[in-house]
Amino acid sequence: MSYTFTEDTSVLYRWIRDEVELESTIKRGKRGIAARRVQEWLSLNGFSLVIDGDYGRVTEMTVAEFQHYNGLNETGEVNDATWRVFVRRMMDVLRRPNEVPDRFDAAMLKAAERHLAVHPRETGGQNMGPWVRLYMKGNEGHSWPWCAGFTTFLMEQASEITGKNMPMEGSFSCDWLAANAKAKGTLVPEHGAGPNTVPPGSLFLVRRTSTDWTHTGLVVEAGRDLFKTIEGNTNDEGSREGYEVCARRRGYGSKDFIIFPE
């Protein structure tokens, strides 16, 4: 099973396929996760409505509006053509790129830039929606903060496109990532961090105590006084409980770093 595909999505992990494949037409009267996915994708594509898992008249009319806007037949039902437009941004980040960097950290950065370009975000509540489930192996909800899941997903994709082994096991836990990097000797502490020691494609960890890290993301560029990032589950406050993948700038205070030596 795979985190990327070239032509056939059947190679993808089951929880990824659940987000991008349509089993059958979804229409008015449908209830449950299928109806909810339609509502989620409508919202993510700018046609916001209540996400309640009930494909009623409002959902039907919103689907028809979406179809009209995208030059599709205005049936109010979600068929293959409509579904493909719903999920095209997710498909973009799952499709294996033609140009493959040699270095693992460079491949990490390339993958992160592709995700950032389509602006993944939550919908339907805290830590909810198709993008959260993608990064968290089908899990979602209050107990599933997804910043480490996002960076782990990038690591898995980088491993596949470069053909290199994962330099460390991924995790949904920032603490576990830090402990694993410490054991491997790849954790760079704050006092040793800078442009000469933290290459693009490394990970940063927000440190609360010497044994507790609360947030993680990818380093895009490290400067003398600040570094640029791409990170998930954050917002304009830089919180660990945000709602999107975004780019930002951060200072080095209370940060440690994980590097991926070749």
Image: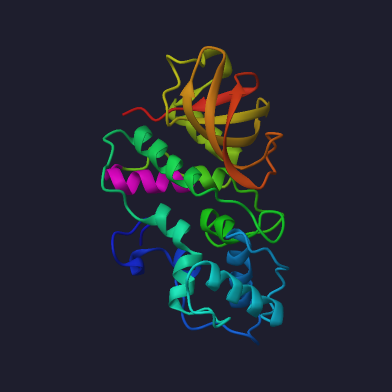
Decide: is 130 above or below 237: below
Looking at the rendering, in which quadrant would you find the C terminus? top left
Residue 198 figure quarter: top left
Residue furthest to the bottom: 29
> Percent x, y for residue 130?
57, 61
Q: What residue is rendered at 44% in x and 69% in y?
A: 84
Q: What residue is rendered at 55% in x and 51% in y?
A: 120
Looking at the rendering, in which quadrant would you find the N terminus? bottom left
Residue 176 figure quarter: top right
Q: Does residue 64 appear in this view?
A: yes
Decide: is 138 above or below 241: below
Please report the bounds of the magenta region as a residue range.
152-164
> Percent x, y for residue 243?
66, 48
> Percent x, y for residue 48?
68, 63
Q: Does residue 171 appear in this view?
A: no
In this image, 25 relative to 107: left or right?
Answer: right
Q: Nearer the viewer, residue 193 or 212?
A: 193
Q: Nearer the viewer, residue 71 or 218?
A: 71
Task: Indicate the colouring scheme.
Answer: rainbow
